[in-house]
Image: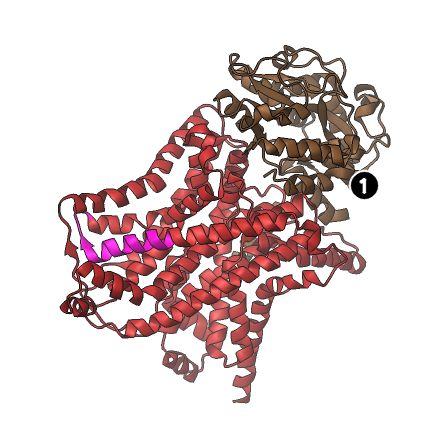
Chain colours: A brown, B red
Amino acid sequence: MVLAAFVAVVIATSGSGDELVIYTARSHYGEEQPFKDYASRTGRDLRLFGGSASELYERLESEGSRSKADVLITVDAANLWRAKEAGLLQPVRSDALDREVPRDLRDPDGEWYGLTQRARTIMRSTNRVKAGEVITYEGLGDPRWKGRLCLRSGTSEYNGDFIADRIAKDGRAATEHMLRRWMANDPKFLGSDIDVLDAIAEGRCDVGLANSYYLGRELAEDPSFPVALEWADQRGRGTHVNLSGIGVVRRTDQRSAAVGLLEFLERPMEQRVFVRNNKEFPVAPEVRAAPEIARFGPFKRDPIDVRGAGAHLEEAVRLMNDLGWE
Amino acid sequence: MGVRRTRLDGWALATLVAALLVAGPLVALPLSFVAGGGRSVTQFSGFLPDAVRNTALLLVGVGAGTLVLGTGLALLVSFCDFPGRAWIEWALVLPLAVPGYVFTLFALGTLPAGGAAIRSPLGAIAIFTVVLYPYVYLLGRAAFLSQSQALIEAPRGLGMSSTRAVLRVAVPLARPAILGGTALALMEALADFGTVNLLGVHTFTDAIYRVWFIAFDRQAAMQLAALLVSVTLTLLVLERLARGRARYHQLAARGQAIAAARLRGPAAVGAVAGPLALVGIVVIAPLAQLSTWAVRSIRDGLLAPEFAVAARNSLLLALMSAVLVGGVALLLAYGLRGSRSRLTAGAVRVATIGYGVPGSVVAVSVIVPLAWLDHRLDDASNTVFGADPGLILTGTVIGLFAAYVVRFLALAFQAVETSLLRIPQDLDEAARGLGADRLEVLARVHVPLLRAGLATAALLVFTEVMKELPATLLLRPLGGDTLAIAVWQATSESLFRTAALPALLIVLVGLLPVALMIRLSGRRPAAIEPSEGPEPQPLAATTM
C-alpha cells in the first residue's frame, strides 16, 4: 500500500504530457494574470515553476534534453544570454513577434524575446532630497550621502545585472571606482526593492536604487507615498534598463504551443496587462507606460546589451562581493 | 547452521548497502576537490573570508547564548520552586516548534524600520539563541534532575552557600549534557539557510547557495559543502564524546532527588515573569501576529498562489518521508542488531551523520550523483526498450526523498534503535528457536513492541520535513512547492501577510512533537536511581 502511494505520488509529480511547462523567474505575486488569460483562452493547462532566474537556468541545464520545461522566462538579460550560450533555447521565427518586439529587444537569432523592460534608477525622499540633487549613478557615491544610502542586497539579480552592464560598458576600473565610493557611504543593505522604498519613506535613508515599477506599485496604493524617482544618467548614456525575456526551450515537444504563448504575451493587449498590473515598461512601442511612472516624464534609456551583461555577470558578482556589497 | 549464516549475511549485506547508499553522497563530497574539470577554491575566494567570519561569529555567539540561557533556565526550574513552575517548565520547550525562518518573518514584519536592527550577524545570533536554547535547557534539566540532593548538601556542609554549591558542583557535573545540548544547537544553526538568507547574513550555507546560483559553480559549491561538513563532523564528535561521559556521571548519582528552594518576593516574580516573557516573545507573539496576518491575507485575497497545492504537497511529502525514513531506520537498526560485522556497524554510523549536515549540502551532494545516474538510466532505457521515461530521479519527488533520507535518517534511527535496545536479545533467540526466520521475528515480535519508538521516529521526521527549506527548494520537482517554500518566497519579497498562513501551519504542526515529548517525559522523580538499560538518547529525545 505504501509502495502504491509512493508510485502514485511519483507519477503525479512527474507531470502529464500535454500541459505547457513554464520555468519563470517572475514573481508569483500578482504577475501571473496574463498566463491565466492564456490558459482560459486556449483551454490549455499551464504549469508555472518558480525560482530565481539562476536557479531555473541551473535546473534547465542539469535536466538537459530531458527537461519537461517548454518555455523559460527570466527577469534579467544576463540569464537570457547564458541560456542561449548553453544551447538551452531554440530559434523562433514569427512575423507577429517581429512586428511586436523591437529589434533591439530580441535576439537576432530569435532565441529569446523581450517581455517587459525594467528601469533600475535612483530613488529619493521627496521630503529630504530635492529633485535634481542626485542625477547620476556615480552621484550616489557623493560623500553627502554617507549614511543616507540604501541598497538591496548584492545577491539580487537586478544588482548583478546592473553592475555587469556597467563593467561591459564603462570597463572594470570605472565600475570598481563607482562601487568603492558607494561602499564608502556605508550603505544600508536591505532584502528587497520594496524594503529600500519603505526605508526611504520612513526616513531611514534618503536615497537608494530600485526598479521603477516597485515605486509605481507603491504610488498606485498610496499616491502620497513620499518617494520619487530620478531618471539617472540622462546627460550620459541614459538610465539602466533590464529585460525580462522569454524563450522556447530547445527540447520542447510542444513548440507550436510555446510559440503561441510567446505571441500571446507580446500582443499589445497583454502588454497592457503587464503595464497595468505590474507598472513595468512594455516592449511594444505603442503601449504607454503606467501613469504612476509616466508622471516622472519621458527618459533616455541606456541601450540594453544582453551579451555584455551576460558575459560579465560572474565578474560583477565577485567584484560586488569583494568590495563588501552584502 | 549453514543456512542461518547465509541469512545473517543477507541482512548484514542489505544493511551495509542501505547504509552506504545513504552515506555515499556525503562521503564523496571531498572528491570535488580532485575530480572534475572545474575551477579551484581560489576562484571564489572572495566568498570565503566573509563566510568563515560570519559562520565563526555565529557559532561563538549562538554557542554562548544558548549555553547561558539554556543552562540558566534549567538551573532555575531544577533548583528553585516558584508559582506555576510545573507549567513554565514545559512552556520553555515550546520555542522548539518555531523554525528560525518563521521567527525571522515575524521579526522582520513587526520590528520598526523593517527589522533593520536584526539584519546583521548579531540579529541572527539573537534569533538562533531564542529558538535553539531548548536543546541546552532540556538536556541540562534532565542532567540536574538526575543529580541527588546529597551532592549539593556535601559542599554546603563545608560552609558553601547553596548558590555556590550549585554553581561549583551541580553545573560541572552536568557539563557533558550541557555541552551536548549546545553542540546540537550549533548544528541546527549551522544547518540553517532560511534565517541567514532572509537576514542577509553571509554564512557558509548562504555562500554555498550563492556560489552555486550566482557564481554558477556547482563544483565550488560542493567544495564549500565539504568544508562545512568537516565543521559539522567536529561538532558531532564533540557531542558524542560529551554524551559518552554523561553515562559515567549518571552512575555517580543515587539517593534523594534535589529539593528545590522556594523563591519568595521579587525573586519569585522574576522567576515567573522572565520565562513567561521569553515564551511570550518567541512563541505567543509570533502565533498571534501570524494569525492576524493570516486572517487578513484570507480576507484580502493575498494567499500565496497555489496555497492549497503547497499544503497538500507538504503533508504528503512529510507523511511519506516519515514512513520511508522510519522504514530505512528500522532496517538499519535491526540489521545492526543481528550483525557482528564491524563494517556494517561503521557504515551505519556514517549513514547517520546526515542530521548535522545542512539541507543545502545534502541537496548538492545528492543531486550530482542522482543527475548523472538519471541521464544514464534514461539512455539505457532508450537503447534497451526504446522508451523515454524522462528523468525519473531528479525530475520527480524521488530525488527529494533521497535527500530527506540522508538528512533525517539519524533522527529516526536513534528513536528506533533506543527502543530496539530495550527488547532483550533472548526474545529473538526464543522466536528463532520456534522456527521463525529473521523477517518473521521483526514483523511479529519487534514491530509490535516498537510501536512507540517507530511512532516517535515518524513524528520527528514528519515535522522536520514540514519545515525543511533548502533541500526542498533545490530538489523539488515541477509543481512541488511546499509551505516552507511559500513562506520563504513571500518573506523574500517582504509580503509578510502572504507568508503568514503557511508559517502558522508549520508552527502548529511543529507543536505536535513538542507536546508528545512533554507527555513522554512525565513527572520529575522523587528519588534518583542509576538508569537501567540503555542510556537516554538526547538527540532523539530533543531534536525537533
Task: Locate residue B204 relative to residue A315 in the image: left or right.
Answer: left
In this rendering, would B439 be left or right of A52? left
- Residue B538 location in percent, x, y? 38, 63
Camera-side residue of A65 and A159: A159
Task: State the image coordinates of residue B501 (x, y, percent, origin top left).
Answer: 44, 35
A159, above or below B249, in the image:
above
Q: Quarter of the image for the C terminus of chain A: give it.
A: top right
The answer to if B365 sits in the magenta stretch is no
The spot of residue B474 in percent (x, y) is 61, 47
Question: Is residue A66 among the parts visible in the rendering?
Answer: no
Q: Is residue B72 magenta?
A: yes
What residue lies at 77% left-to-right and 47% top-to-bottom?
A65
Lateral position of residue B34 relative to residue B259, left or right: right
View extreme (front): residue? A143
How many numbered marks, from 0 up?
1
- Chain of the residue on which disc 1 is drawn: A
Magenta: main secondary structure: helix
Which of the 4 quarters of the picture holds residue B383? bottom right
Residue drawn at point x = 26 percent, y = 44 percent: B274
Instruction: Identify residue type, mark 1.
Output: Glu
Q: Magenta span covers which residues?
A: B66-84
Query: Looking at the rendering, which quadrant does residue A114 occupy?
Result: top right
Q: Is residue A158 left or right of residue A254?
A: left
A101 or B244, which is in the foreground? B244
Residue A138 in view: yes
Q: Callout 1: few (<14), some (14-19), or many (20+) C-alpha neighbours within 10 Å?
A: few
Q: Position of residue B306 (x, y in %)?
A: 54, 34
Q: Which element is circle 1 on?
A: helix
Residue at numbered disc 1:
A85
**Closest to the observer, A324 or B423:** A324
Q: Is residue B255 above or below residue B480?
A: below
> On screen, B238 above or below B368?
below
